[in-house]
């Protein structure tokens, strides 16, 4: 897919809608150098410390956690509506067990600005450098959320990634469902 640099908040509403439906694809390199992607349904694009930041939440049990810990960078890839099946695969199977690019037929490419893989077929891609992380603190979280989302612990690590590059294809709006 041919993408060009875009303004940080271009396609903001469409990206948020994709986040809340099939999910976005979070890319990282594993310690062995393999490219991995995982579906995320939680995240925020905004401004912190005067810089554009993607905030993503990753449970320590995920292979993606190992990847981001290793490389200190990640990509946020916005899939088309037609990639819903791939989002399902990447949201249920682990890169510890399978090569998700081979499984889904998606293509891993090297990000231009950070040490992370990007998904070549995605119409919008953000390349992010981790500048901070913190962990969800159980005693600071309302009990109902602890009960609903953390019955087995595995409290998310929250990664703050400075957006170093953001790109979109010409037809991104159409591919993302308007
Ligand atoms: C729609 C959807 C959204 C998800 N969002 C997240 C998320 O925000 N954070 C997270 O840690 N796991 C999330 N998951 C679960 C991971 O994608 C899933 O456990 C995945 O298999 C982990 O892959 P990995 O072991 O290769 O990292 C989501 C799954 C789906 C289907």
Image (cartoon, rainbow, N blue to C red):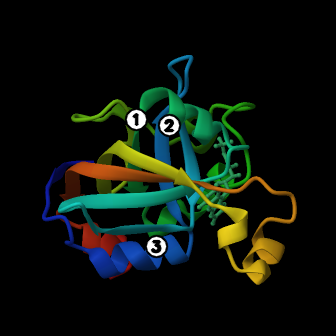
Task: Report the image quarter containing ligand 1.
Answer: bottom right
Judging from the image, what secondary structure is the residue with disc 2 in? helix
Name which of mark 1 and mark 3 comes first in the sequence.
3
Judged from this view, the residue extending furthest toward the front is 139
Residue at image position (76%, 70%) is 149
Q: Is residue 78 above or below residue 46?
A: above
Which residue is more in the foreground, 84 or 32?
32
Residue at image position (68%, 43%) is 62
Residue 126, can we see it? no
Residue 112, can we see it? yes
How many marks are shown on the rendered structure? 3
Q: Is residue 44 above or below residue 99?
A: below
Question: Relative to 142, is 165 on the left or the right?
Answer: left
Question: Relative to 109, is 84 on the left or the right?
Answer: right
Of the two numbered discs 3 and 2 in the rendering, the one whose residue sits closer to the viewer? 2
Name which of mark 2 and mark 1 comes first in the sequence.
2
Judging from the image, what secondary structure is the residue with disc 3 in? helix
Which residue is more in the foreground, 8 or 35?
8
Disc 1 target residue: 117
Of the two numbered discs 2 and 1 in the rendering, the one whose residue sits closer to the viewer? 2
What is the spatial separation of the Cα atoms under label 3 and label 2, in whole angstroms? 22 Å
What is the spatial separation of the Cα atoms under label 1 and label 3, in whole angstroms? 20 Å
Circles 1 and 3 in contact, beta carbons < 8 Å: no
Q: Is residue 38 above or below residue 79?
A: above
Q: Which numbered tag is attached to residue 18?
A: 3
Q: Which numbered tag is attached to residue 16?
A: none
Question: Relative to 101, is 76 on the left or the right?
Answer: left
Residue at image position (70%, 80%) is 142
Crowd band around label 2 with a 10 angstrom C-alpha radius: few (<14), some (14–19), many (20+): many
Q: Is mark 1 within 8 Å of ligand 1?
A: no
Query: In which quarter of the view is residue 41 placed?
Result: bottom right
Disc 2 target residue: 68
């Amino acid at each position: 897919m041919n993408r060009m640099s875009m303004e940080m908040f271009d396609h903001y509403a469409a990206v948020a809608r994709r986040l809340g439906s099939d999910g976005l694809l979070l890319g990282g390199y594993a310690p062995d150098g393999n490219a991995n992607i995982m579906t995320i349904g939680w995240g925020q694009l905004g401004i912190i410390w005067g810089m554009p930041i993607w905030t993503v939440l990753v449970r320590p049990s995920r292979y993606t956690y190992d990847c981001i810990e290793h490389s200190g960078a990640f990509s946020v890839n916005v899939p088309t509506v037609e990639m819903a099946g791939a989002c399902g695969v990447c949201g249920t199977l682990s890169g510890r067990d399978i090569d998700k690019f081979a499984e889904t037929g998606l293509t891993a490419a090297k990000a231009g600005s950070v040490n992370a893989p990007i998904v070549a077929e995605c119409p919008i891609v953000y390349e992010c450098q981790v500048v901070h992380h913190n962990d969800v603190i159980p005693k600071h979280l309302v009990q109902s959320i602890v009960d609903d989302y953390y019955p087995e612990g595995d409290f998310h690590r929250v990664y703050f990634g400075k957006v170093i590059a953001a790109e979109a294809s010409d037809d991104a709006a159409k591919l993302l469902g308007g």
